Image (cartoon, coloured by chain):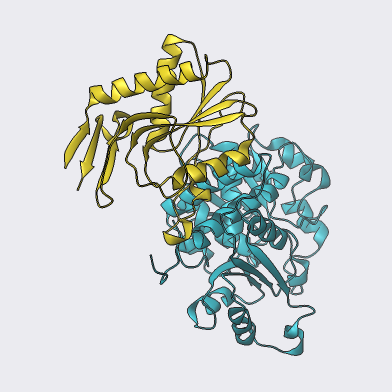
């Protein structure tokens, strides 16, 4: 069981991660039943503190918290005092004064979640929902859950699977968290990207690296396409979108080369026609909608483990 | 530490409870069993196997109650265990809950809430291997293996071969 905060996929032991996945599986089964709502977190308050835009992650956390009967407060930087210049510290202290039990934070700066967790500004459990280009641990958990559900439902972990992560590794917090978690669970991760979109020091990561998608596509079990983050592409990392799409995009020709059991994933939101073609996104091999659905169950499991029992310092 | 029930005592109690369940429900046509993990689930399997021998197969499931416990926030969170609906579900059935020890009654209260989440059985009955008293809620068992008067400071420990390598019920002072 995890305690305290969830800031990085690196903080999870293999056992804790597998435990979260099995808890998520039970919660998914319950929420598929006639009554989706559980009383477990009644009286707890979860704040969604979003300094960056998000659809999926925020709605997913909100749904997860509500299914466990927690109260949810949504905070987005636009339209709040942040646009008047309020600092993270003052925002955090405001939330502390209002009695938040957990803060789900998405922030444009790497390390923002850790900053909140390490200071005394707020006593709540901090859950990192994406900090800059650093990490997005719940996305990695839901990806691991989806992979396990489709390819390793009977086995204990992901040993023997070959996972391609294709695209903008440099700016991708999803890729960082996935590399940490999937390799911990026994999968072999292959990063496929143009050299300009690989981070410095990537040779020290526990992964294989390739610049050629076509040489890798036939021998993988999972292909995870990353979004080209057009808002972070000002520095011309590749000549044209059209060239990127031809070399690193998933299209029907590459889809046909995938093995029979292989699955296609994407953390969303998709740029259809850029990193993934519309027919690949809608193909039977695509589990992108499952990823969204599983996100709710995985986040319920995280909230349950962080908020469900007695907290540190509370009397027995 | 003293031994309250031996392996053969447990065996006899399970057989008697099985007969009582069949008798009270006038057969097994509308019957389902659900065990509360960990040991209640094994007891439900044993009762189910014995009823199958004498009367025919009876649908059996497992009910995890962790998320409904009222002492959830007094203790660290526990991992969830699988809930398995009996084949055919519980809607309109006569449901017999099975647990190892009946003590405060709080587990059973949580189980009743958990059942409400799964459907609406026609009736809910309770079978336990040991009733040790000290109820904190207005709950009673329909089928009891053995009533054992205890003091609050003592604890009753059930061992079952499926989980603990031997069949035994002991009283720990």
> Can you give x and y, in whole percent of width and height, for residue A95 in the image?
62, 79
Residue A210 visible in the snapshot: no
> Can you give x and y, in whole percent of width and height, for residue A259 in the image?
64, 34
Q: Is residue B71 left or right of residue B129?
A: right
**Closer to us: A275 or A208:** A275
Question: Residue B148, located in which quarter of the rendered image?
Answer: top left
**Closer to us: B44 or A184:** B44
Q: Residue at x 53, y 16 (%)?
A: B28
Chain B colour as displayed: yellow
Q: Residue at x 50, y 45 (%)?
A: B109
Query: How many marks overall?
Result: 0
Residue A280 visible in the snapshot: yes
Quadrant where the image shows the N terminus of chain B:
top left
Vertical placement of residue A124 versus A176, above or below: below
Q: Is residue A104 left or right of residue B46?
A: right
The residue at the far left in this view is B1
Q: Residue at x 64, y 44 (%)?
A: A31
**Closer to us: A31 or B148:** B148
Vertical placement of residue A22 versus A203, above or below: above
Q: Is residue A179 left or right of residue A87?
A: left
> Can you give x and y, in whole percent of width and height, for residue A220 in the image?
60, 41
Q: Which chain is cyan?
A: A
> Can you give x and y, in whole percent of width and height, for residue A254 in the image?
73, 41
């Amino acid at each position: 069981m995890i305690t305290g905060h969830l800031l990085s996929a690196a903080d999870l032991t293999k056992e804790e991660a597998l435990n979260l996945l099995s808890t998520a599986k039970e919660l998914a089964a319950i929420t598929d039943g006639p009554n989706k709502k559980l009383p477990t977190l009644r009286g707890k308050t979860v704040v969604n503190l979003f300094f960056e835009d998000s659809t999926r992650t925020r709605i997913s956390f909100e749904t997860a918290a509500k299914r466990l009967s927690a109260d949810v407060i949504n905070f987005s930087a636009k339209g709040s005092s942040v646009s008047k210049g309020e600092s993270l510290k003052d925002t955090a202290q405001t939330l502390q004064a209002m009695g938040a039990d957990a803060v789900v934070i998405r922030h444009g700066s790497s390390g923002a979640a850790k900053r909140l967790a390490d200071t005394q500004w707020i006593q709540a459990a901090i859950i990192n929902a994406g900090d800059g280009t650093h990490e997005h641990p719940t996305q990695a958990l839901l990806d691991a859950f989806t992979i396990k559900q489709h390819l390793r439902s009977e086995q204990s972990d992901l040993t023997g699977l070959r996972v391609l992560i294709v695209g903008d590794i440099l700016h991708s917090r999803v890729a960082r968290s996935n590399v940490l978690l999937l390799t911990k669970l026994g999968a072999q991760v292959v990063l496929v990207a143009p050299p300009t979109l690989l981070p410095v020091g990537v040779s020290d990561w526990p992964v294989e690296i390739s610049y050629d998608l076509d040489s890798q596509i036939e021998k993988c079990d999972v292909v995870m396409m990353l979004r080209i983050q057009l808002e972070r592409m000002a520095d011309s990392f590749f000549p044209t979108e059209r060239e990127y799409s031809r070399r690193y995009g998933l299209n029907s020709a590459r889809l046909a080369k995938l093995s029979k059991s292989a699955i296609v994933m994407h953390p969303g939101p998709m740029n259809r026609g850029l990193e993934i073609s519309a027919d690949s996104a809608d193909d039977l091999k695509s589990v992108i909608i499952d990823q969204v659905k599983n996100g709710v169950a995985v986040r319920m499991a995280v909230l349950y483990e962080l908020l469900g029992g007695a907290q540190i310092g509370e009397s027995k | 530490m003293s031994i309250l029930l031996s392996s053969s005592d447990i065996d006899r109690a399970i057989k008697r409870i099985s007969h009582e369940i069949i008798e009270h429900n006038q057969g097994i046509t509308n019957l389902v069993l659900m065990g509360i993990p960990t040991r209640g689930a094994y007891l439900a399997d044993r009762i189910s196997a014995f009823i199958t021998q004498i009367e025919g197969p009876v649908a059996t499931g497992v009910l995890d109650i962790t998320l409904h416990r009222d002492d959830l926030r007094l203790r660290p969170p526990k991992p969830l265990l699988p809930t398995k609906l009996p084949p055919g579900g519980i809607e309109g059935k006569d449901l017999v809950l099975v647990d190892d020890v009946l003590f405060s009654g709080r587990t059973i209260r949580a189980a009743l809430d958990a059942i409400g989440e799964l459907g609406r059985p026609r009736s809910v009955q309770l079978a336990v291997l040991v009733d040790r008293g000290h109820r904190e809620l207005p709950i009673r068992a329909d089928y009891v293996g053995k009533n054992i008067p205890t003091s609050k400071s003592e604890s009753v420990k059930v061992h079952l071969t499926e989980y603990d390598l031997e069949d035994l019920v002991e009283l720990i002072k």
